[in-house]
Image (cartoon, rainbow, N blue to C red):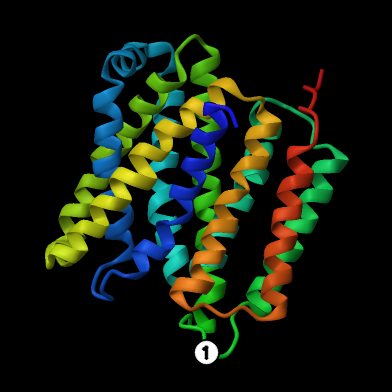
Amino acid sequence: MSPAVWALVASCVLWGTTGTAASFLPDAVSPLAIGASTMTIGGALLFAVTHRSALRVLRDRAVRGWLLAAAAGMVAYPLAFYASMDLAGVAIGNVVSLGSGPLFAALLEWRVLRHRLSVRWMLSAGIAIAGMALLVSGGHGAGSPVDPAGIPAGVGLGLVAGAGYALFTFASGIVIRRGHSGRGTMGAAFGLAALPLAGVLLMLGAPLLASVGSISIALYLAVGPMFLAYLFFAIGVRDLPSSTVTVITLLEPLVATLLAVLVVGERLELAGWLGLVLILVGVAVLSSARRPRATT
């Protein structure tokens, strides 16, 4: 495999470990504190290594609104993502967050750029929504550490995470198309997102500092799945076609689900497995579609 493929695979494997790593933190640690710490530390590191190009983006008043929108998406994403996995379980929270992102991105293109929603998009959305309905109605089985009562709220938060990430990718894409580098745009957006999340960390982060083990997990989540994974991802998307990138990124929910079952001990009912598969099929159908045409 090429270095770009290896880099993209590495990023997906790192992202797939987030929920399992977070599951080893004490119950006293809020998922909001986990999300805030990953972005505060990881975002600051990304800004530090991209500061020259990131500062150019920050100084460009013409893209400031879109940059702030991208940063807002990355404020919402980690908070909702970790809260979703806390309530619905690692497997369900991860797949809903990842699977709903492309659907929300297409809606943004339709609403803002006036791109038509294709029949293929409607089909993929229908498949994914059916999958989410199966997850809510019968996701986890007996013996699973996840409380079934929390699954609907967890799925809802997964949708919020997907919408936040879609906003980040949509808005940062506009900044890039206006002449800025992907690394600089990412560094600027992540650096801005780290500022309000640092406040969340100050308010809720005390239990995260209660033991060496908790601190180690928090640092891993910030340095591995946040800092290094996004650097690897930037290498992959730079040298690979978007269709290849989309297919490879499906490794993330696969890794997350396998770790959730084998390490965390989650047990999914047949309806839960079918729901996960339907969401991934919906993402695959959407990724195979050609870019929608703008209306005239």
Of 222 and 178, nearer the camera is: 222
Badge 1 is on which residue? 143
- Asked which quadrant contains residue 48, the reply is top left
Residue situated in front as seen by the camera: 236 or 79: 236
| Foreground pick, 252 / 293 | 252
Quadrant where the N terminus sits is top right
Point 29% across, 40% down: residue: 42
Q: Is residue 163 left or right of residue 288?
A: left
In the foreground, 26 or 10: 10
Q: Quadrant of the C terminus?
A: top right
Residue ID at (27%, 39%): 194
Does residue 233 sit above or below 32 in this rendering?
Answer: above
Name the secondary structure under disc 1. Answer: loop
| Coordinates of residue 258 in the picture (x, y in percent) | 55, 65
The answer to which image quadrant residue 248 occupies is: top right
Image point (82%, 47%), residue name:
122
Q: Quadrant of residue 278?
A: bottom right
Q: Extreme front residue here?
A: 1
Task: Left or right? Give the position of 109 relative to 73.
Answer: right
State the image coordinates of residue 162 (x, y, percent, origin top left): 55, 49
Q: Residues within 10 Å of mark 1 (few under 14, many from 20)?
A: few
In the rendered view, does 34 fall on the left or right side of 90?
left
Q: Which three-letter amino acid code belongs to the residue tagged 1? A: Gly
Residue 16 in picture, x, y percent from top left: 48, 54
Q: Does residue 115 appear in this view? A: yes
